[in-house]
Image (spheres, rainbow, N blue to C red):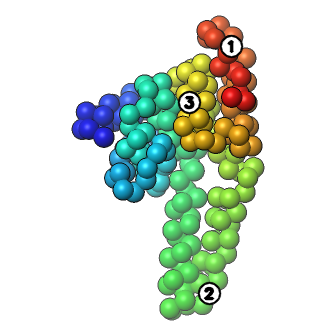
């Protein structure tokens, strides 16, 4: 990614932060970091401990997709989803310290790891976090651009056939139907292809 691309992404992040609904405002300024090409190839973006990470390939995506990704990742931050990550790190620290010093801390760490693990992997909770993040993206940029961008991303990632992606696309499609004045092309609602 060129420095110019990183500036475009950072500018988009700042613009999105200014547009955030008042009830969803963040109490901190997230940063955006481009992952090195050797770290992750292909398309992808993640939020880790308050930082939005994007791959080098993702940096060259179309503008609507960039907005979708920024809005979606901000949605994870607004939803407090990073707190599961903090809980995971705390639990591992307790487990390590407890194993060396205090067995009670090790048991507490193990219990927290179990809770955090279930929070991360439980399909319904994971899907709810993704729905929330997508809803924030729709609130920031409107349903049409977000549906077309989500379909574009699913095709790039090759996961359009998965039940989670289908559920997310159907949820996004429902936003189109609730805002019919913004629809310019109903063909984007064909979620199977």
- Decide: few, some or many residues near mark 2? Use Cα within 10 Å; few <14, some 14-19, many ≥20: few
Q: Which residue is mark 3?
A: 152
- Decide: few, some or many residues near mark 1? Use Cα within 10 Å; few <14, some 14-19, many ≥20: few
Looking at the rendered structure, which numbered label has been put on residue 186? Answer: 1
Residue 126 lies, in percent from the top left, at 68, 50
What residue is rendered at 30% in x and 34% in y?
5
Numbered label tally: 3
Viewer-closest of 98 and 32: 32
Marks 1 and 3 sit apart, C-alpha to C-alpha, by 15 Å
Q: Can you see residue 159?
A: yes
Q: Tag 3 or tag 1, which sits nearer the N-term?
A: 3
Q: Looking at the image, is 94 positioned above or below residue 102? A: above
Looking at the rendered structure, which numbered label has been put on residue 104? Answer: 2
What residue is rendered at 40% in x and 41% in y?
57
To which quarter of the image does residue 115 belong? bottom right
Q: Quadrant of the C terminus?
A: top right
Please, what secondary structure does the residue beneath circle 1 have? helix
């Amino acid at each position: 990614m060129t420095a110019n691309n990183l500036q475009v992404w950072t500018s988009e992040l700042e613009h999105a932060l200014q547009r955030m609904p008042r009830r969803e405002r963040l109490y901190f300024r997230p940063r955006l970091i481009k992952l090195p090409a050797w770290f992750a190839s292909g398309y992808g973006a993640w939020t880790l401990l308050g930082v939005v990470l994007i791959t080098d390939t993702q940096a060259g995506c179309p503008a609507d997709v960039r907005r979708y990704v920024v809005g979606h990742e901000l949605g994870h931050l607004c939803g407090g989803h990073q707190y599961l990550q903090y809980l995971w790190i705390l639990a591992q620290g307790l487990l390590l310290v407890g194993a060396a010093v205090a067995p009670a801390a090790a048991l507490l760490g193990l219990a927290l790891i179990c809770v955090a693990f279930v929070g991360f992997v439980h399909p319904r909770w994971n899907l709810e976090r993704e729905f929330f993040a997508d809803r924030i993206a729709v609130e920031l940029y409107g349903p049409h651009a977000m549906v077309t961008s989500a379909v574009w991303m699913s095709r790039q990632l090759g996961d359009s056939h998965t039940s989670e992606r289908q559920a997310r696309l159907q949820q996004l499609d429902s936003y189109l139907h609730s805002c019919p004045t913004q629809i310019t092309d109903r063909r984007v609602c064909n979620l199977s292809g």
